[in-house]
């Protein structure tokens, strides 16, 4: 597989995994929106990374257990507190 085709496949694969996770774990925990969902680390000191959807299952689930789902606007507000 050519490099560009491989990168495209990987991006799509990660995006599908991300969308599937948010469909199960959404909506926004603050306002109930299902638009523009994002991960919010409850304790930013425990944050390892925000790009978790390409990680192996055990590592990904451990990081996601530190998070809640927020829409973009609620995430912005929460982060600025």
Image (cartoon, rainbow, N blue to C red):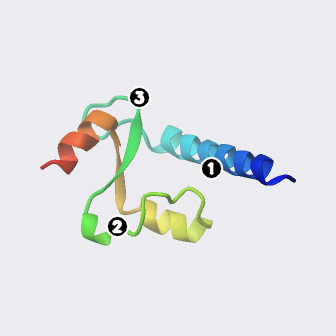
Mark closer to the chain start, 2 or 3 = 3
**What label does residue 47 carry, if any?**
2
**What label does residue 58 carry, if any?**
none
Report crowding for label 1: few under 14, some 14 to 19, many 20 or more residues within 10 A (C-alpha): some
Q: Is residue 2 rendered to the left or right of residue 8?
A: right
Residue to which mark 1 is pinned: 14
Q: Is residue 34 rendered to the left or right of residue 75?
A: right
Residue to which mark 3 is pinned: 35
What percent of the width, then of the height, locates residue 28?
Answer: 34, 37
Residue in view at x 41 percent, y 28 percent: 35
What percent of the width, then of the height, locates residue 19?
Answer: 56, 40
The answer to whether 2 is drawn above or below residue 23 in the figure is below
Residue most toward the left?
Answer: 81
Q: What element carries label 2?
A: loop
Q: What element carries label 3?
A: loop
Report crowding for label 2: few under 14, some 14 to 19, many 20 or more residues within 10 A (C-alpha): some
Q: Is mark 1 on a helix, strand or loop?
A: helix
Residue in view at x 58 percent, y 42 percent: 20
State how far apart marks 2 and 3 are (Cα): 23 Å
Q: Report how many numbered discs are placed on residues in the image.
A: 3
Is 64 or 38 nearer to us in this picture?
38
Residue in view at x 41 percent, y 30 percent: 34
Is 64 or 50 nearer to us in this picture?
50
What percent of the width, then of the height, locates residue 73?
Answer: 27, 34
The answer to whether 23 is drawn above or below residue 14 in the figure is above
Mark closer to the chain start, 2 or 1 = 1
The answer to whether mark 3 and mark 1 are in CB contact below 8 A is no
Residue in view at x 41 percent, y 33 percent: 36
The answer to whether 12 is drawn above or below residue 62 in the figure is above
What percent of the width, then of the height, locates residue 51?
Answer: 49, 58
State how far apart marks 2 and 1 are (Cα): 20 Å
């Amino acid at each position: 597989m050519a490099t560009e085709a491989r990168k495209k496949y990987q991006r799509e694969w990660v995006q599908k995994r991300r969308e599937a996770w948010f469909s199960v774990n959404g909506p926004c925990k603050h306002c109930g929106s299902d638009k523009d969902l994002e991960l919010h680390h409850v304790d930013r000191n425990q944050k390892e990374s925000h790009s978790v959807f390409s990680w192996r299952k055990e590592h990904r689930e451990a990081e996601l257990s530190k998070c809640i789902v927020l829409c973009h606007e609620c995430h912005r507000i929460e982060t600025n507190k």
